[in-house]
Amino acid sequence: MTPLVLFGGTFDPVHRAHINGARAVARALHAPVHLLPNAVPPHRPQPGANGTHRLAMLEAAVARYPELIADDWELRQSGPSYSLHTLEHFRTLAGPRPLVLLIGADSLAGLHTWHRWQDYPTLCHLAVLPRPEAGEADPAVLQAFPQGDAATLCQLPAGRRLMLKRPFLNVSASAVRDALARNGHCPALSSDVEAYIQRHHLYNVPNTSKPPTRPGTA
Ligand code: ATP
C-alpha cells in the first residue's frame, strides 16, 4: 500500500536538507511526501517569517519535484500546531494505508518530550533522517518503534521505524538565517527560495544583496 508521508517543521526557511531528505524518503517508500509548515510552534521561539511567507517559500522549493507537496493544513488550524493533532487528522484520512511521520535524528532524540508521544506508535511509523550531532534517542522511544525496512512500512499501518542513511547534511535553518543576515545569500537554499527572500526582505537580508551568479546563468 502507498503510505501517506508527513514532514512537519517550521521551514524558516526550507533548505536543501529538508528537500533532499523528503525526496530520499519519497524514493524509498514510492510515495509522495506532504511538507507541513507549522502555525505556532509550541516548543521554540516564533519563526522569523510568517506562515504565508514560509508556505510560499516551500511552494517555490517543491515546484520542480512532483513527489513533494506543500501542505497548508497546519497553517489553517487555529492554535498551536501539535504533531499529535496533525497525526490524528491524517490517520483518519489515511484509513488502512500506512501513515509515516518523517523527522530528523535530532527530533527523534527529543521525541520522548513531545506531547503524548506514547500514542504515536498506534498512529504512525517513523522515517528518520540522519543529522550531524543529533544526539541519542531515548531507549523507550526506540523500543516503542521497532526498526523496520521500507517494505514493512508499506505493509503495516503504523508502529515501525525506518532509519535512513542518506542524505547526511550539516545544514540548519538557523545557520541559513545567519548567513542571509550577513551577506544576503546562502548556498543551502534553492535559487527560487533565495530570490523570494530577497524580494520580500526577509531575515534581515541586507538591501544591497543581489542574487549570486550561478553556473550557466551568467
Ligand atoms: P532550526 O535550525 O531553526 O532549528 P531546522 O533546520 O532544524 O531549523 P526545522 O524546520 O525545525 O528545520 O526542521 C523540520 C524537520 O527537519 C525536523 O524534523 C528536523 O529534524 C529536520 N531537519 C532539519 N534539518 C535537517 C538536517 N540537516 N538533516 C536532517 N534532518 C533535518
Image (cartoon, grey):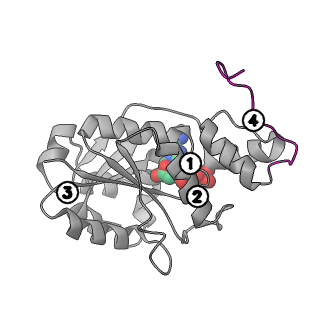
What is the secondary structure assignment of the residue under circle 4?
loop
- Marking on residue 211: 4
Q: Which residue is mark 2?
A: 54
What is the secondary structure assignment of the residue under circle 2?
helix
The amino acid pointed to by label 2 is Arg
What is the secondary structure assignment of the residue under circle 1?
loop
- Total marks in image: 4
Q: Is residue 81 left or right of residue 14?
A: left
Question: Which tag, 4 or 1, sits closer to the chain's start?
Answer: 1
Residue 194, horizontal then vertical, whole percent: 67, 42
Real-space Cα separation, disc 4 to disc 1, in angstroms = 18 Å
Question: Which tag, 2 or 4, sits closer to the chain's start?
Answer: 2
Say if disc 1 is inside 8 Å of ligand 1.
yes
Real-space Cα separation, disc 4 to disc 3, in angstroms = 44 Å
96, 199: nearer the viewer: 199
Residue 123, horizontal then vertical, whole percent: 24, 64
Q: Which residue is mark 3?
A: 158
> Disc 1 vs disc 2: Cβ atoms closer than 8 Å?
yes
Question: Which tag, 1 or 3, sits closer to the chain's start?
Answer: 1
The amino acid pointed to by label 1 is Val
Q: Nearer the viewer, mark 2 or mark 4?
A: 4
Question: Which tag, 1 or 2, sits closer to the chain's start?
Answer: 1
- Marking on residue 14: 1
What is the secondary structure assignment of the residue under circle 3?
loop
Q: Main secondary structure of the magenta part?
A: loop
Q: Is residue 157 visible?
A: yes
Q: Which residues are magenta?
A: 205-218
The amino acid pointed to by label 3 is Ala
The amino acid pointed to by label 4 is Pro
